[in-house]
Image: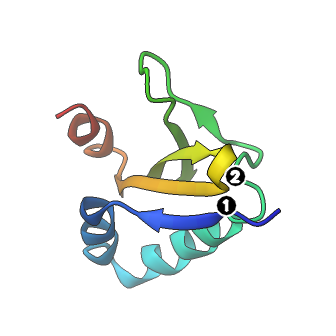
């Protein structure tokens, strides 16, 4: 089963503002989520009712939700590890 990947507008904006080398690395990881939305190294974030997951690539994080019944991976936010969790809460 192949999952569809969709970005929240904010996540797409943050992704495009990243350095090009980080975008290339993250693109590979995000594209791989279509085949396996729960790869090794994925972490389910605690203390949230919406069931967010995160993958990491160097100093960057991708926060997303998995909707198995719709075969959808919804990218909620992308950013540097210093800022990503603060922005997720706000």
Q: Residue furthest front?
A: 69
In this rendering, does residue 58 appear at all?
A: no
Residue sitting at x 39%, y 84%: 20
Q: Which residue is at a point 70% across and 67% down the rendered structure image? A: 32
Which residue is painted at 69% across and 65% down in the image? Answer: 34
Q: Is residue 74 visible?
A: yes
Using the numbered discs, state the Cα–Cα distance from disc 1 to disc 2 in whole angstroms: 4 Å
- Residue 33, quarter of picture: bottom right
Determine the residue located farthest toward the right in the rendered image. 1
The numbered mark at residue 16 is: none
Expressed as whole percent of the image width and height from the top left, the position of residue 79 reads 34, 56
Q: Which residue is mark 1?
A: 33
> Counting other residues with Cα less than 10 Å from the Cα at mark 1, is it few (<14), some (14-19), or many (20 or more)?
many
Residue 11, percent from left and from top: 32, 61
Residue 5: x, y in percent?
55, 66
Residue sitting farthest toward the top: 47
> Which percent across, then down, holds residue 54?
53, 43
- Left or right: residue 54 versus residue 70 is left
Quadrant assignment for the N terminus: bottom right
Tags 1 and 2 touching, CB below 8 Å: yes
SS assignment at label 1: loop
Please rate how many residues cluster around mark 2, counting C-alpha atoms within 10 Å: few if below 14, some from 14 to 19, many from 20. many
Q: Which of these two is toward me, 45 or 6? A: 6
Name the residue that disc number 2 marks. 37
Image quadrant assignment for residue 83: top left
At 66% from the left edge and 41% from the top edge, which residue is drawn?
Answer: 42
Give above or below for 67 relative to 60.
Answer: above
Q: From this viewpoint, which residue is outermost toward the left?
A: 90
Q: Is residue 86 above or below residue 55?
A: above
Q: How many marks?
A: 2
Q: Secondary structure at mark 2?
A: loop
- Which quadrant is home to the C terminus? top left
């Amino acid at each position: 089963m192949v999952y569809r990947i969709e970005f929240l507008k904010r996540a797409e904006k943050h992704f495009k503002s990243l350095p090009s080398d980080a975008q290339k690395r993250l693109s590979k990881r995000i594209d791989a989520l279509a085949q396996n939305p729960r790869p090794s190294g994925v972490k389910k974030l605690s203390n949230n009712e919406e069931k967010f997951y995160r993958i990491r690539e160097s100093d960057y994080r991708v926060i997303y939700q998995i909707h198995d019944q719709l075969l959808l991976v919804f990218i909620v936010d992308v950013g540097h590890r210093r800022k990503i969790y603060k922005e997720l809460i706000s």
